[in-house]
Image (spheres, grey):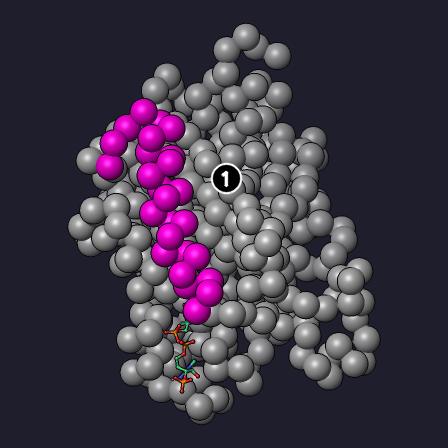
Amino acid sequence: MPERLRPVGIVGLGTAAGEDLLTNSDLEKMVDTSDEWIRTRTGIGTRHISKPETATSDLAYRAAVEALADAGLTGADLDLIIVGTVTPDMPFPSTACLLQSRLGADHAAAFDLNAACSGFIYGLAAGRQFVATGMYDTVLVIGAETLSKITDYTDRSTCVLFGDGAGAAVLRPVGEGEGILSTVLGADGGGGELLMQPAGGSRRPATHETVDQRLHYIHMSGGDVFKFAVKVMGEAADAAVERAGLTRADVDVLVPHQANRRIIDAAAKRLGLPEDRVVINIGEFGNMSSASIPVALHEAVRSGRIKRGDVVVLVAFGAGLTWGSAAIRWSR
Ligand code: UT7
């Protein structure tokens, strides 16, 4: 292991989204809701929903291929694959292992992690350590979800929120002073019951009864999660900025988890950031959990909104409860 830690940056990005579009007017026909309620309370207009035959690894694969091409690499170059997801193809093997085979990443290790909507940031923090220490040179970090598979389309309080997608980032050593400057992770397991998929694990294995009771779907106490989110988003973003030795004024672009437009606006206000420095794509994609941040990040990079040298702050919160943030000096 080298004496000094190596700077690590994102050198390639890729994304994928569910194949079909689910609009607010589609939802008006499914549950007692309205386009007006959804737009004003959440900021969501559409979400991308995967076809019945599409699994999380399919979206992850499409995002990974694009990220590898963006980095000028192939699967054979990868040392490690980390997939953050709460909707794996199946409990085991891991989605990361399914991907490892499909990408021809023959010498790569692979694992999934579950930090819900904070999964990409947790993956970024984990992947960064492997490259920083010199254990690995090239790590693929993915946030990928098919939340539509665990969404109850008879529950109006949740079904209007979620969409399917994947975002992938390739991590490699970068120049001194560039790349990921800080990462912050947190958890409060005491709030676990606020957002959960109650059955299907060892506590309540799948039975006819659990299926009849709709316990394999997302259950959420929306108002409580909302309050937690507004508080933690500002605090976590500030912590990443501080740990990087920067101030709020140094932040060029904030890429927040896309859960609710009102949560994003409240966090931006708290941080004193004007709207033009905040990436928001919830209107098109809804909440894609761990995929939200890498998809929004990729969009901002592709459109030229993020340029080399910019300070980019990522911040997420999610089930667990979990939260995470990162400050990055964009290196490409
Ligand atoms: O990635 C992390 C995951 N989750 C989140 O971040 C979610 C955080 N929470 C939220 O985004 C918001 O709490 C929601 C969007 C889920 C709900 O918005 P809210 O402003 O907190 O609404 P509410 O739950 O307080 O409900 C207000 C009213 C209720 O009716 P009554 O009791 O006032 O008559 C709900 O039944 O709105 C009703 N309602 C709806 N009405 C139309 C709830 N969902 C809907 C709906 N359409 N889809």
Q: Is residue 71 left or right of residue 250?
A: right
Residue farthest to the front, as pictured: 190
User: Relative to the observer, which residue lies in front, 285 or 220?
Assistant: 220
Q: Is residue 289 left or right of residue 218?
A: left
- Residue at x 30% of width, y 53% of height: 267
User: Residue 308: in sight, yes or no?
Assistant: no
- Residue at x 30% of width, y 45% of height: 254
Tell me residue 223's x, y (percent): 43, 69
The magenta stretch spans which residues?
A: 223-248
User: Residue 88: in sight, yes or no?
Assistant: yes
Is residue 317 shown in magenta? no
Is residue 239 shown in magenta? yes
- Residue at x 71% of width, y 49% of height: 94
Tell me residue 279's x, y (percent): 29, 52
- Helix, strand, or loop for circle 1? strand
Mark 1 residue type? Leu
